[in-house]
Image (cartoon, rainbow, N blue to C red):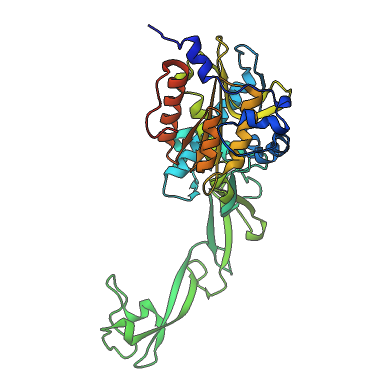
Amino acid sequence: MKWFPDKKKKDEEKPVTTKLNDVTGDNIESVSKNQDQRFDLKDLQSNIEERENITDAVFKGHKSFGVDDNVKDLSNQTEQTQIGDAEIGKIIELVLSSKEDNIIPSVNYEENRWSYPLLEQLGSPEHVSALLEEISSPSVNVLEKGEFERLPVCPKHPQYLATSVKLYCSGCLSSNVSKLHLIEHKACGYITTKIGFGEVSTGINQCASCKKTIRDPDTELRKLGRWYECNNCKIRFDDLVTKLHCRKFDHDFEINQADIAIVPYYKLKADAKSVSIYAISLIPQFQKLSAFKGFTVEGSTSVKGKSGVMHKTSIFASNRENKTVLIDVKSGESTLGDAEINSMLVKVLDIAPSVAIFVGVPEVSETGKALATAHNISIVTGKDFEEIIKSTEQILRERLYLGKKMDQGVE
């Protein structure tokens, strides 16, 4: 049997719904009577957009969502964007959970492509490469793209990576050449090739001049250099002709004619690790929470408050019973302060959701927690993905359905 809180309990849990335009000057005390901190909502509102551009930059296809709207069907474009967001989040999660700082490619010369083994579970190499390009683009700007390797490719067929080096005789241009090692016997001064010293499979064993047995080649012999000998015209030379060979279409080309194929690698940007990384990874997972059954859930959307102001949110959800949920995800290198909670508070006062949750990574200050508690904003903190998801699910179930007190570990 499904149980819903009675009206009295629902009224007790309902967030403050004072209109933004009514909260000014002295009467701010009536709104924040449970805490002593005073603030100017107009000043806070003017700074919201500056503080919230990170999430806006990493997601596309935002929709406006009114507080009084009923359940809305998502468009095909939004669904496509959500799929992309989920994959982006998965990429970041895989990188963070691995011991590698970089996403390194593996080149397959026969198939003329490169792949990224760390991300192979996400689909084909072409699909993964497209995702990486998107995340490293200026519009998203979470990954930094670098050059892993530069490959010389055929100027006529640059789409094929299989290129090899061919060596030719400088006289007749035959490829039938052998490499010679010129060696000196220190004892008698005799200079010849390895063969002249009676080279066998186990090494050099005798000097052809003085007939002395070579017992220790490393100390008795001196390497003077390398030469080449053409097995066709029999000339010896050191100016070997080097060319590149297109293996796909079996033809040579000069080295200075080669095109260059750049194989990229990717790494998380330093600022992305501390600012937007958790929001990108967590939002798609929040959208799949079982507590949202029966809700229309939108990630990284804009919500219209009662004042007419559009507020950017990490998650906004509503159902046919006019219950609404607002979740904001913020992260930083250290403890989040009052500014982030004040930004959330402005949204809560103007939107008046049924449930408001602030996810702060890695931690929220004690004054920030007190301010959130005074306005019925639940706080979830930490750095572990699974724990954050679990705690958020628990809060949603308790506040939406069960009405029980929250367990320890959940603010």
Looking at the rendered image, the quarter that the C terminus falls into is top left
Q: Is residue 9 left or right of residue 194?
A: right
In the image, 11 versus 26, the foreground residue is 26
Measuring 53% from the left and 59% from the top, which residue is drawn there?
Answer: 166
Q: Say whether residue 87 is visible.
A: no
- Percent position of residue 272, x then y: 57, 45
Q: Work out whether 55 lies above or below 228.
A: above
In the image, 400 versus 60, the foreground residue is 400
- Percent position of residue 221, x then y: 36, 85
Measuring 48% from the left and 23% from the top, which residue is drawn there?
Answer: 288
In the image, 222 versus 410, the foreground residue is 410
- Percent position of residue 127, x then y: 54, 34
Looking at the rendered image, the quarter that the N terminus falls into is top left
- Percent position of residue 80, x then y: 59, 24
Query: Which quadrant of the figure has residue 75?
Result: top right
Q: Say whether residue 41 is visible.
A: yes
Query: Which quadrant of the figure has residue 55?
Result: top right
In the image, 254 versus 21, the foreground residue is 21
Q: Residue furthest bottom?
A: 188
